[in-house]
Image (cartoon, helix red, strand yellow):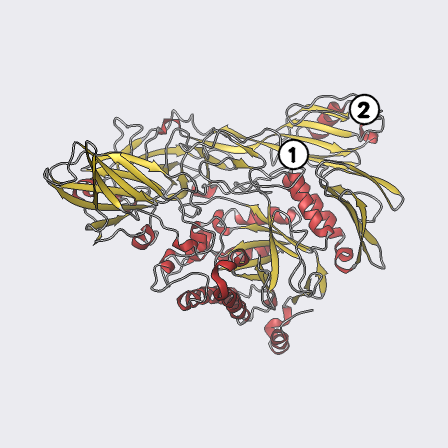
């Protein structure tokens, strides 16, 4: 076992260490107070929810069979300006960690401070990029000083509150850097030196618990290298004294503007977990367990959506994503029951051929077994220790006593919840929403070209704006004469741009705009323009939609109008080019409505309720509404709007962009769980708005009285269709194998009726079940009506004793149910 000698001496000498938890490790497992542990963890990012949501999310994690909650620490959120810190509201890291502790769970603190996480700029503050001589994630003195300053500050904050396990707190593991092994080759020898520096710096902080480095095959000792990915059963640590650990099991995938909704099947996630533990794993973390919402401007990318649902076991709003949540909970219960055998047993393997293997964990007290079938197409029937077992393709069966199968990853015995959106019962929307409006004041920039700074050069948007806004104006005035070579009957403006979205104006007239295709952010925009003899004001609005968060040297990926910019004159066959790149350019960050906080409930600004215009660019809209009744999560439907930002009672709920439709091809109603998952494998929402509904946390709302919704509409849209809805369980389905207990729940609402029930070999899917060729003698619907209707939840023993005999000719009998909530 590995543990800090310095820490042990501390515990002997300092009375405050009396209640310390000793966290160590050997080649088999993380050891807590001398006991090897099977540890199941889930990622919940505190800034992607609200403080009011944290207790419920963490409690659901514990009830779902997790031992630990894992989170990143977000540098740019906490230090938006150098040496000015913010730990307020949902950035209260200490409060989040204490909420984990209050629930009796462990914590895994991934300080990074590079986090990736589809978070803006990978968690790095943009001021860091703008420091002289700065280069990220390498042996750069300026970077290392700033990284060490922030990392040390976080560690000291956590130590002060005694939250490390070595102090009696919940945090059992800490992480330095993040997935650097994926890019280290680009940094050469400096990258190798940097990762050694990271290890030494982290180790010097004396936290008294192990440090981990994910995706770092050459992690220096005593760092523990870990695996990230969809599957990590083939992962081997770089040191025989390092346990096999999986820090990111991707439960789904993120979504881009213009992209489809990705889904990872429940069966495949469970298969990956069971396979990992079959092959010697002892620590596994779900990324994400709750994805949440990218509020404000926190989404990275570029083009990461406001929703970060991730198809996680808890959905964006905190609801149970069934059956994923329930099926994994059952797996966790089985793995925990086998903990001693899995962490102390001798391991042997039987190869049956055709990609089927059995793994036996044996101690003096007993044995536990896995039977894994990695074949993507062929089910297996094998004779193992004198008993026949049916193991579906791409699945793992678990036999805690090596005799009785209690779990198979492909056999889901938990309910599927069908979520529905319901209208706001507090008022008749959208007709009751009365809108007022005001234009964004852009006259000074369009007609006068007035900015905050002037330079004879085109600069990257990050350098000028410090990422204080999505918006940066580039303005220049060009004096033209009819005798100038560029003057002609046909003139145009040509812009070499890396703006994610670009608007171009000449003499106050909007000549066009461009939305970059995802992944193709370097483009040339050219549009005809009318120029006048004399002074001409050229105004370009560059808009970013999240800064890059991944890749070697991603901090240097340009954004904005990086040039060159030309006026093009054409007279017949002659083309003349006038380069404006070294002209005097004025810059202005942001929009006046943001500066004047038109979104604030306290804003004294005047709004007009007369002749509210639709489909008008650069326009502010405001309305009041009643909070939806009840306690179910709330969303606002922004269908009909273009692109912009939304606020509820002054709280920024994120960027919206319903006008950006998902690609029309590549979706399927059915998804085969068999075979390796990839992000494009199972997608829905083709041809629809990338994101139509936006999360409105209940804590943002006034339950009594009016609430205010403010929209800044950038490209033109129609707010008349906007309405608020609640999300809840509409109906629940199950298709459960015999000899299991089915639990049905409507998530706090009563079960109102049983739409379908059959015990035998029913067919179909949720919403379209049908009776099969055999059925039990007792009326399944009547039994379930008596047992469940009127109750918020019920448990049913799926057996012939309950439902009567069913002659199904040797077929596995199942109970199919659809209940209405």
**Res 749 → quadrant:** top right
Could you tell me how far apart the alpha carbons at marks 1 and 2 are, in whole angstroms?
Answer: 30 Å
Select label 1 or label 2 by which is in front. 1
Q: Residues within 10 Å of mark 2 (few under 14, many from 20)?
A: many
Left or right of 57, for residue 307? left
Q: How many other residues sit within 10 Å of disc 1, few (<14), some (14-19) or many (≥20)?
A: few
Query: Residue 691 in the image: x percent, y percent?
Result: 46, 35
Q: Is residue 570 left or right of residue 85?
A: left
Nearest the eye: 175 or 108 = 175
Q: Quadrant of residue 404?
A: top right
Residue 467: give x, y in percent of width and height. Answer: 35, 51
Furthest residue toward right: 386
731 above or below 633?
A: above
User: What residue is rendered at 46% in x and 55% in y?
Assistant: 552
> Can you give x and y, in whole percent of width and height, for residue 315 in the image?
55, 40
Residue ID for mark 2: 776
Question: Which image quadrant: the C terminus?
Answer: top right
Regarding residue 714, the answer to whether it shows in the image is: no
Residue 292, percent from left and from top? 51, 44
Determine whether, in the image, residue 224 is placed left or right of residue 590: right
SS class, disc 2 = loop
Q: Is residue 264 visible?
A: yes
**Dividing the image into 4 quarters, which one contains the N terminus?**
bottom right
Q: Nearer the viewer, residue 404 or 281?
A: 281
Name the foreground residue: 381 vs 726. 381
Question: Residue 672 has which mark?
Answer: 1
């Amino acid at each position: 076992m590995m543990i800090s000698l310095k820490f042990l001496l501390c515990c002997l000498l300092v009375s405050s260490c009396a209640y310390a938890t000793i966290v160590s490790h050997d080649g088999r497992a993380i050891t807590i107070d001398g006991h090897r542990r099977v540890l199941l963890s889930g990622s919940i990012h505190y800034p992607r929810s609200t403080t009011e949501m944290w207790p419920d999310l963490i409690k659901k994690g514990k009830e779902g069979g997790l031992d630990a909650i894992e989170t990143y620490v977000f540098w740019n959120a906490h230090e938006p300006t150098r040496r000015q810190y913010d730990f307020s509201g949902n950035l209260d890291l200490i409060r989040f960690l204490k909420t984990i502790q209050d629930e009796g769970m462990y914590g895994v603190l991934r300080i990074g401070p590079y986090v990736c996480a589809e978070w803006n700029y990978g968690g790095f503050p943009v001021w860091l990029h703008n420091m002289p001589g700065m280069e990220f994630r390498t042996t750069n003195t300026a970077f290392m000083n700033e990284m060490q300053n922030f990392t040390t500050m976080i560690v000291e904050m956590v130590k002060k509150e005694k939250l490390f396990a070595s102090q009696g707190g919940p945090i059992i593991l800490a992480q330095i850097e993040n997935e650097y092994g994926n890019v280290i080759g680009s940094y050469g020898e400096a990258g190798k030196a940097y990762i050694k520096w990271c290890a030494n710096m982290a180790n010097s902080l004396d936290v008294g618990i192990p440090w981990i480095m994910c995706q770092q095959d050459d992690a220096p000792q005593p760092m523990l290298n870990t695996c990230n990915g969809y599957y990590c059963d083939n992962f081997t640590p770089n040191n025989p004294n390092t346990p096999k650990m999986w820090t990111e099991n991707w439960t789904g995938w993120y979504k881009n503007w213009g992209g489809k909704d990705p889904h990872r099947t429940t069966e495949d996630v469970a298969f990956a977990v069971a396979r990992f533990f079959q092959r010697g794993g002892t620590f596994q973390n779900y990324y994400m367990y709750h994805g949440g919402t990218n509020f404000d401007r926190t989404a990275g990318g570029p083009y990461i959506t406001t929703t970060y649902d991730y198809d996680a076991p808890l959905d964006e709003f905190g609801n149970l994503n069934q059956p994923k949540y329930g099926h994994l909970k059952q797996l966790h219960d089985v793995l925990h029951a086998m903990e001693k055998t899995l962490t102390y047993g001798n391991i042997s393997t039987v190869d049956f051929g055709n990609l089927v293997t059995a793994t036996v964990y044996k101690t003096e007290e007993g044995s536990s077994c896995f039977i894994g079938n990695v074949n993507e197409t062929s089910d297996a029937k094998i004779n193992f220790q004198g008993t026949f077992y049916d193991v579906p393709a791409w699945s793992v069966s678990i036999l805690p006593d090596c005799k009785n199968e209690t779990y198979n990853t492909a056999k889901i015995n938990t309910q599927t919840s069908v979520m529905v959106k319901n209208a706001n019962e507090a008022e008749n929307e959208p007709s009751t929403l009365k809108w007022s409006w005001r234009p964004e004041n852009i006259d000074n920039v369009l007609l006068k070209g007035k900015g905050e700074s002037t330079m004879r050069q085109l600069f990257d948007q990050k350098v000028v704006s410090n990422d204080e806004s999505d918006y940066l104006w580039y303005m220049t005035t060009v004096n033209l004469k009819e005798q100038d070579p560029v003057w002609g009957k046909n003139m145009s403006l040509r812009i070499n741009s890396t703006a994610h979205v670009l608007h171009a104006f000449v003499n106050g007239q909007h000549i066009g705009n461009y939305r970059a295709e995802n992944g193709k952010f370097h483009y040339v925009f050219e549009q005809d323009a009318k120029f006048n003899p004399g002074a001409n004001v050229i105004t370009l609005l560059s808009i970013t939609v999240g800064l890059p968060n991944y890749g070697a040297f991603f901090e240097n990926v340009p954004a904005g109008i990086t040039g060159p910019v030309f006026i093009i004159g054409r007279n017949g066959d002659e083309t003349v080019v006038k380069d404006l790149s070294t002209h005097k350019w004025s810059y202005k960050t942001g929009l006046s409505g943001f500066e004047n906080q038109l979104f604030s409930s306290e804003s004294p600004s005047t709004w007009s309720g007369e002749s509210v215009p639709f489909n008008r660019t650069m326009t502010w809209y405001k309305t009041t509404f009643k909070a939806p009744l009840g306690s179910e999560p709330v969303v606002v439907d922004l269908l009909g709007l273009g692109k912009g930002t939304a606020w509820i009672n002054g709280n920024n709920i994120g960027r919206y962009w319903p006008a950006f439709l998902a690609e029309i091809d590549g979706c399927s109603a059915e998804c085969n769980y068999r075979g390796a998952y990839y992000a494009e494998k199972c997608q829905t929402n083709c041809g629809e708005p990338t994101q139509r509904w936006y999360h409105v946390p209940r804590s943002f709302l006034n339950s009594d009285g009016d609430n205010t919704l403010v929209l800044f509409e950038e490209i033109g849209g129609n707010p008349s269709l906007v309405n608020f809805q609640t999300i809840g369980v509409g109906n629940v389905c199950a298709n459960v194998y015999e000899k299991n207990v089915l639990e049905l729940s409507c998530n706090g609402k009563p079960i109102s009726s049983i739409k379908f029930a059959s015990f035998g070999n029913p067919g179909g899917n949720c919403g379209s079940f049908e009776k099969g060729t055999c059925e039990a003698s007792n009326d399944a619907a009547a039994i379930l009506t008596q047992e469940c209707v009127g109750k918020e939840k019920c448990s049913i023993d799926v057996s012939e004793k309950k439902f009567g005999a069913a002659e199904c000719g040797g077929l596995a009998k199942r109970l199919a149910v659809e209940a209405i909530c």
